[in-house]
Image (cartoon, rainbow, N blue to C red):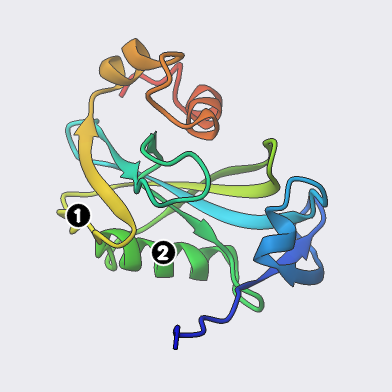
Amino acid sequence: MKNFIPEEWFPLVDEEGNTTGKALRSLCHDGKSMLLHPVVHLHFFNRGGELFLQKRAKTKDIEPGKWDTSVGGHVSPGETPIEALMREAGEELGLNNFVPEFLGKYVWKSSRERELVNSFSTISDLVPVINKDEIDEGRFWSIGEIKENLGKDVFTPNFEHEFMIFFNNSSL
């Protein structure tokens, strides 16, 4: 008999981040409902100004095998974005002792979903420990190397959009 894994619930929010209800993951990602749900992203920089990116597992249902933000994940019902960020950073990269800086939030819409993205960054000498169940690989990229690969189907569209908002004019 196959193990039953209960489906995740996501909080539903308005564009300010106020909770308006909840819905199952499958409904939020069905490409029809476009229910706005909150997510968190972390941009993890080393002291040399390089940005750690993760290569999404080939088993992911959205943008498999593409390079993406250092950490990304859904906010759970009853959880604040900062709590979700700390949980996801621990789960994906083993990062627990860092100080995140809030960059901003925006609505991201793809063919499958609508997300309220809460974006954060941090600069640290911590060494990421990749969770192979979540991520295929990860490494630090220079800002120049990222800019050279924009628009070449290397990164997720959401990462490219977010990079342009927060870091394209950066002197890192």
Point out the residue furthest to the front here: 1
Secondary structure of residue under mark 2? helix
User: Whole-Å distance between the Cαs marked 2 and 1?
Assistant: 13 Å
- Which mark is drawn over residue 99? none
Does 6 appear above or below 150?
below
Quadrant that contains the N terminus: bottom left
* Residue that appears at 46% across and 14% down: 151
Where's residue 21, x and y in %? 82, 71
Secondary structure of residue under mark 1? loop
**Going by the image, does 148 lie left or right of 152?**
left
**Going by the image, does 51 lie left or right of 78?**
left
Residue of label 2: 88
Camera-side residue of 48 and 72: 72
* Residue that appears at 33% across and 67% down: 91
Residue of label 1: 128
Does 32 appear above or below 65?
below
Residues at marks 2 and 1 touching, judged by CB atoms closer than 8 Å: no
* Residue that appears at 76% across and 69% down: 23
Mark 2 residue crowding within 10 angstroms, few (<14) / some (14–19) / many (20+): many
Where's residue 76, x and y in %? 60, 72
Camera-side residue of 53 and 3: 3
Where's residue 104, x and y in %? 60, 43
